[in-house]
Image (tube, rainbow, N blue to C red):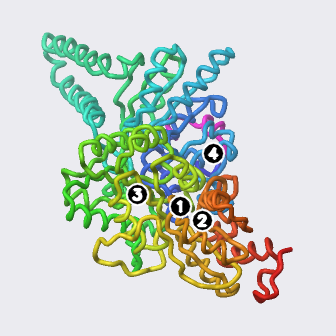
Amino acid sequence: MDALLEHIQSPSHLRKLSRESLKGLSIELRERLIETVSQTGGHFSSNLGTVELTLALHYVFNTPEDRLVWDVGHQTYAHKILTGRNARMGSLRQLGGLSGFPRREESIYDAFGTAHSSTSISAALGMAAAAKLTGSQRKAVAIIGDGALTAGMAYEALNNAGTSNCDVLVILNDNDMSISPPVGALNQYLAELMSGRFYAEAKKLGGQMLRNAPPLFALARHLEQQTQTLIQSNTIFEKLGFTYTGPIDGHDVDGLVVALEKLFKAKGPQFLHVVTRKGKGYEKAEIDPITYHGPGKFNPSVGVVGAVSTKLTFTQVFGQWLCDAAAKDPRLVAITPAMREGSGMVEFSQRFPNRYHDVGIAEQHAVTFAAGLACEGLKPVVAIYSTFLQRAYDQLIHDVALQNLPVVFALDRAGLVGADGPTHAGMFDIAFVRCIPNMSVACPADENECRQLLSSAYAQDHPVTVRYPRGAGVGVELQKDLAPLPFGKAQVVRQGEGLAILCFGPLLYEAQKVAQSLNATVVNMRWAKPLDLQTLREIAQSHDRLVTLEDGTRMGGAGSAVLEALQDMKISSQVLIMGFEDEFTEHGDPGLLMQQYGLTATGIQRGIEAHWPMVQVAPSLRRVV
C-alpha cells in the first residue's frame, strides 16, 4: 500500500482523506520529521508535539484562504510538509533552502512571518478584524504555546480580542514547556486547568460504576455539570471575553477534528486549550525535550551525542564568568527571559538559586526588573540574545539608561546566527545601543577578552552591553582571575604602514590575516562606545587610509561612530566601513554567509583592494585612485 504522505501536495489533498486515515498519516508525518530534521538539524521536539494538531487544522480549515498564524514558528515543520514543501525539507535552514520559520515570501500558506514569540494573537486578530471590515468569511487562527503566553504582548492581544467581537480562534498548545522549563503563576494556573483531564478520566470510570444506581447516577450528572461550569466558565480566558473549550488531548487527531469543526462554526472570540507532549513519538525527545529542542544533525537510532570540542563557546565563557563573579560579589543577581540553557546559566541557577531570576518570555519586564534591582544597590546582569533585546528597547532607554543604572547586558548571538536566519541575527545592537546616552558597548574579539570585558562592564557605575557571537571563538586560553581590561581603551596589535584596520569584535583574527598581505596596522578597538579617541587620533594622523570592521550593520554602527569622531576632531581621513549592508541576512551556514557578505579574510582584502586599487603596492608608491 502506498504511503499516504506521498500523495499530499497541499491541504486540499489532505481534506479528501477520510477522518479515519488521519491517525496513520500522523505516524508517517512524524517519521518524516525525524528523518529530515536528523539530517539538517533544527527545532525538533516542538515539531513532534504538534503533528496531530497541524493535521486537524489543515483538515478542518480552508487554508490558505483561512489564516493560520503559528507563534514563534518552532512547530511549523509539519505545516511545511503538508503545504507543498515536503520535497524540499532536506534544504531546511540551509543557504538558499527552506527557512526554519514561517515566511510569507516562501509560501502562501505562511500567513504571517514569525520567529520571536507572542505575536500570533495580535496578528490573527488583525486578520480577523480585516475580514470583518471587508465582509469576508475568512477565518483567523492563532496557535500559541504556554511559554509564549507568558509574554505581555500576548495578554495585550487577548485583552483587545475579547472585546473585539471578531471571529478569531486562539489555540493554546500547552506542553508544559517552552525552551527552558516554564515559570510563573500562569504555568501553575494552566496546571490547575489540566486537572480537568483527570476529571474526565474519572468521569468515564465513575459513569460505568453508577449506571446501575439511578439516584446516584443523577447526582453524579448534576455534580458533573457543576464541575464543567467551574472548569470552563470561570477561566481567565472567559473573563477576558473568550468562549473557552478544553483542555483536550492534542494527540487525539479525531477528537481535535471534532472540536475544530464546532469552533469553525462558532462566532466571536474562541479559545481552545490543547494539551500535547513535546517530543511526542521519539522517546529520547520525550524524556529530554530541552536537548532535543534545537539539535544539530544526529543519528535517530543513537540520538544526540554531545560534541567533543576543546574550545569553549562564548556562551560557556559567560556562564563561567557569571559564577565566578557571583562567588566574589554577593550583590550580583542574574536575569534571563526564559533562556537559561541558551544563555549558559544552568550552573548559576543551581549554585545561586536565590540570585537567579527566570522571568519567562518577557524581555520588557526583564529589563525593568533589573532596573528595580539596581535601584536597591544590587548589581544585575541581564543575559539576553541580541535579537531579543530589541523587544525591550523602550525599557532600555527609559528605565535603565535615563536613570543611569549599573546594569550589565550580556548580549549573546551578536552578529550572524546562521541557520536561524534574519529573525535571530544580532546585527543591529551596536547601532541601536550606542545612540543611547549613558550606555557603553563592549566588543570582545575572543573568549578571554569576553571574560575580561564582562569584568570591565561589571565594574562600571552605568549601563554597559557586552556583545559576543554564537559558538566558539579561536580557542584562546582564559585567565583565571576576574581582572578587567581598561574601560574604553583600544589595543594596537600589529604595526604596519599606510593602511590601518580598526576592528570591533571577533573579526580581528580575519583582519590580522589581511594585514600580513597588505602590511597594515591592526587595532583591536574593543569598545564601540566610548571610542578610544586618543588611539584613534594617533592612528588617523599616521595612516593614509582607515578601514573599520564589524560584525554588525554598517548603517549607524561602529564605523559610523569612527566617522563621527574624526569629524569632531577635524581630521579628514579616507575611511572604508566594512560590515553588513542595509539588508536582512539570510539563513544558512555561518561560514558560507560570511563569505557571501565579504567578511572573511579573502573578502575583506578584496573589498579593500576594490576600494583603493593601489593599496597592495609598496607604501612609498601608494596613490589614491
Name the one closer to the observer, 276 or 487: 487
Magenta-drawn segment: 9-21
Q: Which residue is drawn at 29% across and 45% down?
A: 374
Location of residue 519 by image quarter:
bottom right
Amino acid at circle 4: Arg
Q: Locate residue 504, reporting x and y percent.
A: 55, 67
Rounded to the nearest angstrom, the CA distance separating label 1 from label 3 is 15 Å
Q: How crowded is mark 2: few (under 14 residues within 10 Å), some or many (20 or more)?
A: many
Q: Is mark 4 on a helix, strand or loop?
A: loop
Rounded to the nearest angstrom, the CA distance separating label 2 from label 1 is 10 Å
Q: Is mark 3 on a helix, strand or loop?
A: strand
Q: Residues within 10 Å of mark 4 (few under 14, many from 20)?
A: some
Looking at marks 3 and 2 on the same chain, the residue that comes earlier in the sequence is marked by 3
- Residue 528 numbered mark, or none: 1
In the figure, 578 relative to 85: above or below? Answer: below
Image depth: mark 1 or mark 3 in front: 1
Looking at marks 4 and 2 on the same chain, the residue that comes earlier in the sequence is marked by 4
In the figure, 618 relative to 267: above or below? Answer: below
Q: What element carries label 1?
A: strand
Does the magenta portion include 591?
no
According to the picture, the residue beneath numbered tag 3 turns out to be 410
Looking at marks 1 and 4 on the same chain, the residue that comes earlier in the sequence is marked by 4
Image depth: mark 4 or mark 2 in front: 2
Looking at marks 2 and 1 on the same chain, the residue that comes earlier in the sequence is marked by 1
According to the picture, the residue beneath numbered tag 4 turns out to be 103
According to the picture, the residue beneath numbered tag 2 turns out to be 550
In the figure, 135 relative to 84: above or below? Answer: above
Looking at marks 4 and 3 on the same chain, the residue that comes earlier in the sequence is marked by 4
